[in-house]
Image (spheres, grey):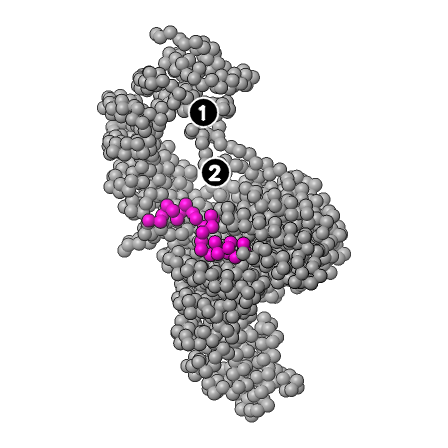
Amino acid sequence: MAEAPAGTAELSALLAALLSTDNRVRKQAEAQLKTASRHPLALLPPLAYVLQHNSDPSQRQLAAVLLRKRLATAYKELSPDVTANIKEALLKLLLNDPQWYVRRSIADVVSVVAKQAVPKNDWPELLPFLQQCFQSSSEEHREIALVVLGYLTESIGESMPHALATVRDFFLRGLQDQSRRVQIAAVKAMTGLMRCLAAARDKASVQHLLTAVLTTTRQCVADGDEDILPQVFEMIDEVIESPSSVLSSCAQQLITFAGEVALNRQFEAGNRHMAIMTIRDLGCDRPKLLTKGPEPLLQQVLPVLCHLCAEGQEKDDQGDPGDADEEDEDEEDETWVVAASTLDALAVTVPAKHIFPFTAQFAAQAIQSAKPEERMAALTVIGRVAEGCADLMKQALDPLIVLLLKGLNDPNNEVRGAAAVCTAYCADALEPNIVNHHQALLPKVFELLDDPEDSVKERACYVVDRFCDQLSENEQGDEILPYLDQFMNRLGNVLQSPKRDVQLMTIHAISSLAAASQAAFVPYVKGVLTALLGFLSLTEDKVLELRAAATECAGIVVKAVGIEAIEDVIAPLVELIFQGFTLDYSELREYSHGFFCHLAEVLGERFAPYLERVVPLAMNSANTDDGAVFDFGDEDGGGGLQSLVTQLGDDDDDDEFDMDPEDLLKGISVRTGVLDEKAAALSALGTYALKCGAQYKPYIESTVEVLDQLSTYFHEDVRIQAVLGMSHVFAATVKTFPSAVPTDPPRAEVALVLAKAVDMAKKIIETDEDSEVVGSACTCLKNVLCPGSRAALQPHLQTISDLTLLLLRGEALCQSTDYEEENEEEDDAEMGMEEKTLAEGLLDCTTEVCVGLATALGMEYQPQFDIHMGAIVERLGQKGTDASMRGVILGNLAQLASTEGQLLAGHVHSLLPHMLSTLGAEDMESRRNSAYAVSAFCASEAVVAQLTPRYGELLHALFPLFSAQEFAGVRDNAASAVCQMIRGNKSATPLEQIMPTLLGALPLQEDKAEGGAVYGCLAELLIQGEAALAPHMQRVLEIFAAALGDERIADKAKEQMAQAVGHLARNFGSQLEALLQGLPETARQRLSGAAQAALGQA
């Protein structure tokens, strides 16, 4: 035996101490090792000696781990003789150490050395050695060769690409080996090779290897070796990320294998979930692969996912009321939940025409099943595809309502609960169309609120919450009024439930009812706030979530009913909210800031007395410790020798631990509640400034400071609120320090805050990678572009214009994605749904800045506007700009046409082709936006003059939007567009041809704001005695009667209709009387009353 180098005995003792179960001994040893690690070269000889000669396998393994870390940085400093000795010794040890786990650690050392030696062709013996191992009769030798190759594949691929074929053959031999251990080693080591072959676009090799891997894997799992599956799915992830030319040849195999694993209930849940996620990743990243060909893969995928949605949904609803959170966490881990979320993701990525027909057929059959879990699956499937398939589902609402009602009436409580959740999903996705069916659905929801099962009551509250949210967002809150009393009575009863999750959802439902019903909620305020006061007094940690929800609800109620309705309870209510800040619960502080935001919105400048208390609280939250923890530990969860070595904290610059910024951010763990609290605090500061105006003066400087500081915070939600808040503080500053004359130079305070706001927005737009943050910076710029700040804006107008142009051209940092770079040469590369939504939102915010510039500058904006329009027109024509994005652009330009149409006049002809194509878009919102743009353009005298020669093309494109199958909102906007065309140039419009189609689409069904254009146009034509209306007079009167009875039609439009009917009564009394006789009594009364009112005014 060779003589032990100096320090070997001490090192052996140190290793023994590191492995001690005595914490004190181990801590001392860790400190000693950290000191010794400052001289890594001195450690190498004794570590190598221990690895070769020590009789304790645990010490040999630890020596190998430490040697790996030392060689990772010290290898380049060693002499060629030393490195040659190390390489020779490692290969011998790799074959001869008696313990497998020690050999496995030695393989790690070999990999570290090889990664540095192989690229320099400095270890020519390695591949022949591994080849010799493959030929060995020992399965252990063949196995360790594959382990080493798995580490080295990428290094070989980069420095010796010609050797990849040899490596591939090694792996194929391993997969076909008679030893199961060798087969499994080959599968586990395959990931790196697949990555290299895919990058080289070696389609044949990838396909051949994948077939072999899956064949071996099936054999292994059939024999009970299920542990191999995680490595297989890791390898499959590499294949999914490969170029489409490679992936397309393997997709069938991948989907088939993933389906087999997902459906096998004998496998562990984690493995089944990985299989489902494989389907999700492939479908969401490359949706065309699932839909192309005569037998698309989606036909294989959808039955698997729908079947899984029926698995294991039945639950025992008994248990302690406080166990709800644990139940929710358990549910998230269930296979049917993973399958349902995957179905959801595919539905929003893959075109609905490929998803909805099958899922609708599945649901129609499953809802008839005798098995409750299959009936639940029917409802789960429909609910999960609702968002992605919304357009098609809106066209098939009648059968959907039948399905929902059947579920809501089901004798099984779990099915009723699933039906309630499905109804809520549909209320979110299918608004506003589904709201029209409230008379059928809401009575069933009433019954569910009386259901004996708490879980059903909870889901019923969820339906109320979502339904009311949609009514509120679409300004249809009055639709809920007939049911308000019934809802509130039942919700009051449900609130008495002992289950916290039921109470929580009930409070959310009450919040949504208040937001939807507004002033009509006043009769219920006293009872609701009395009940909330009880929740607002809770102090135990386990119920603080309820207190937070009650705080949020109180704020919503205050905003809905106004301060007058709560004057007698506002003082104790406010004090309880203030007391909540003393409790250690971030969510409670978040909603407390939200409460005071709502109170400030209601009180306006009268909120000022609260500022001295609320501003410091918001500042405290903004500056609170975010609890960031940096965790870059090993994947083994912190156990074993590797974790021990990582904890030793040596200071070496180990290349293996280098991290790029993205990986670094992944290692940051922050309490999300604190992030939400910070964002809410910044939102509150901005609201206080905006609503209190000059009263906010004492806090302007400190608020600007904290907003500026947090505008670079690592989390996007905080940055968003910082930049938005800065524009609100600017508004307060303008009110606090007004100029004597608007044209005078701005006060120094105003100029300073404006400069801060523009500079903050500029930095974000130029450097931030998050599209939503950049969009908020655009909103900040639009907010400061107010006519009253014209003089202050002058130094910044060029900067704002340049930033707008940068974004319109798509050249900002956030608009350059890795996704696009990786897929730029692939024919079927598609922007993911999330990326598309973000890009669309940013485009919306950017074009809003153009509107702001036009509002602030008027015709002085023309030179810059022409440049911006050049970029906009170019963007409209780009391949990546789909109909939805074109609709957003046209919708915002329509706003500009209504105020500064002259700016647009010279660009009409370049916009028209995009407007015409978007009128025929697949998605409803794009068609609607484009029709709205036609209406707004034709309402502008300057613009319509340019459009008149193209009326024929416009009418031809608008005609399909009047179909009975078209969405009501689209049809309403199309009617408005035609009416504005008539008003803009009646002589260029073929009235006799278009009038039957136009009148057939009326009265307006959804977008009642178009009443002024539509009914005003018809009234004008009547007064003008337009002959084209003569054959349709009774139909016009029917339309007027309906509109006059609609509370959502503007008074001005009603006045115009009344004047037109009065004109008929005055000049054609007998003919009008004859026409009225053919109408229902209610219609006759409305029209007669309108005529009399008009004649009386005359």
Relative image position of residue 682 (x, y in whole percent) = 63, 48
Q: Which residues are magenta?
A: 799-825
For the residue marked with disc 2, what is the amino acid?
Pro
Residue 494 horizontal/vertical position (percent): 62, 52
> For this rendering, which residue is in front, 122 or 12?
122
Mark 1 and mark 2 in contact? Answer it, CB < 8 Å: no
Residue 274 location, quadrant:
top left
Q: Does 660 sit left or right of 93 as displayed?
A: right
Q: Which mark is residue 661?
A: 2
Residue 121 versus residue 714 in the image, above or below: above
Q: Position of residue 873 (x, y in %)?
A: 43, 62
Q: Which amino acid is tagged 1?
A: Gln
The percent position of residue 1085, horizontal first and vertical second, equals 60, 82
- Residue 760 within the segment the image draws in magenta: no
Dividing the picture into quadrants, the one containing residue 490 is bottom right
Q: Is 290 in front, or is 1018? A: 1018
Considering depth in this image, is 259 or 790 the residue closer to the camera? Answer: 790
Residue at image x 43%, y 17%?
Answer: 41
Check residue 642 in the rendering and tell me which mark sits there, or answer none. Answer: 1
The relative height of residue 130 versus residue 411 in the rendered view (above or below) is: above
In this view of the protein, can residue 654 be seen by the observer? yes
Q: Give the side of residue 441 with respect to residue 992, left or right.
A: right
Tell me the chief SS of the magenta region: helix
Alpha carbons under labels 1 and 2: distance apart: 24 Å
Residue at 45% from the left image edge and 12% from the top image edge: 12
Give the camera-side residue of 419 and 985.
Answer: 985
Give above or below for 708 relative to 924: above
Instruction: Decide whether residue 800 is among the magenta residues.
Output: yes
For the residue carrying disc 1, how many other residues have a C-alpha within 10 Å: few (<14), some (14-19), or many (20+)? some
